[in-house]
Image: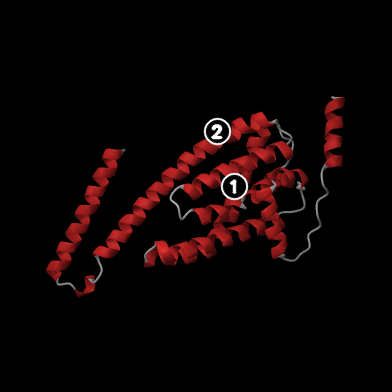
């Protein structure tokens, strides 16, 4: 009992003090934090304060999401049709909203996982651990031009960061953290690759549809009917092909 109390006292003594909120947005500070997370994750999480409010980590998540949206919009200039191009630029606004909401949800899940692993840290600490990991978002977006590479790198890198957070922040054994987050990362990778495959298939079909209906307003009723028939036939064949592959 005494040894546990001594360990908790030592942990409180060695934990870095929570920084005072500056009340202003400093992009250089955000960039420096992202650089440190990506290049020295063990050192970052070791020195990361577990408290200090939600404002700064929320801002960090939002900035990383904006950067991701900008990169996705740029890629859409070269890889998408007009509809997906508009969606790409809309992502600059949409990504930060969903990223911040997702961060609170992800932190809640991580909080439960770390509690089950024996951690005594609170929800805010879990949120800070996850918010820092969103530094991989822009990297994944940059690599997304290559099919599936962006997803693979993002999941693998994010898994590594959660392992480092488990060890440095939550004082869990590295072997245990590697097993837990290795399994979770593998499941997430399978899910994300499947989702990307489905989205790419849908994008190809939408592009084909756009090509088929070019000049549709100038067609006669007979030509328009024939074009629609061919399009529906293509959808049916595609559905049968997906069913056979499944």
Q: Residues within 10 Å of mark 2 (few under 14, many from 20)?
A: few
- Where residue 56 sits, quadrant-wise, is bottom right
* Viewer-proximal residue among 78 and 218: 78
Residue furthest top as drawn: 1
Q: State the image coordinates of residue 38 (x, y, percent, origin top left).
A: 65, 50
CA distance separating discs 2 and 1:
20 Å
Residue furthest left as drawn: 222
Q: State the image coordinates of residue 191 (x, y, percent, origin top left).
A: 46, 41
Q: Is residue 211 left or right of residue 37?
A: left
How many marks on residues? 2
The numbered disc on residue 105 is 1
Q: State the image coordinates of residue 63 (x, y, percent, origin top left).
A: 62, 61
Asked whether residue 94 is in view, the answer is no
Q: Is residue 86 left or right of residue 20?
A: left
Q: State the image coordinates of residue 152 (x, y, percent, origin top left).
A: 50, 44
Q: Residues within 10 Å of mark 1 (few under 14, many from 20)?
A: few
181, above or below 79, in the image? above
237, above or below 181, in the image? below
Dot 2 corresponds to which residue? 183
Provide the secondary structure element on which disc 2 rests.
helix
> Quadrant location of the N terminus?
top right
The numbered disc on residue 78 is none
Name the residue located 51 percent from the left edge and 40 percent from the top edge: 188
Q: Is residue 220 left or right of residue 60?
A: left
């Amino acid at each position: 009992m005494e040894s546990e109390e001594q360990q908790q006292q030592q942990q409180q003594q060695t934990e870095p003090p929570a920084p005072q909120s500056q009340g202003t947005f400093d992009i250089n500070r955000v960039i420096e934090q992202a650089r440190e997370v990506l290049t020295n994750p063990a050192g970052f999480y070791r020195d990361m304060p577990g408290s200090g409010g939600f404002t700064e980590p929320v801002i960090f998540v939002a900035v990383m999401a904006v950067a991701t949206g900008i990169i996705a919009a740029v890629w859409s200039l070269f890889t998408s049709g007009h509809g997906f191009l508009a969606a790409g630029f809309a992502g600059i606004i949409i990504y930060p909203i969903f990223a911040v909401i997702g961060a609170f949800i992800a932190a809640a899940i991580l909080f439960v996982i770390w509690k089950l692993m024996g951690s005594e840290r609170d929800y805010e600490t879990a949120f800070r651990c996850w918010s820092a990991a969103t530094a991989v978002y822009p990297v994944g977006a940059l690599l997304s031009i290559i099919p599936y590479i962006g997803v693979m790198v993002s999941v693998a890198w994010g898994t590594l960061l959660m392992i480092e957070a488990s060890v440095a922040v939550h004082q869990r054994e590295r072997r245990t953290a590697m097993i837990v987050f290795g399994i979770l990362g593998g499941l997430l990778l399978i899910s994300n690759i499947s989702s990307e495959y489905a989205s790419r298939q849908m994008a190809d079909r939408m592009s084909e549809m756009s090509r088929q209906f070019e000049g549709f307003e100038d067609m006669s009723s007979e030509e328009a009917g024939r074009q629609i028939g061919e399009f529906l036939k293509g959808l049916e064949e595609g559905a049968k092909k997906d069913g056979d592959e499944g």
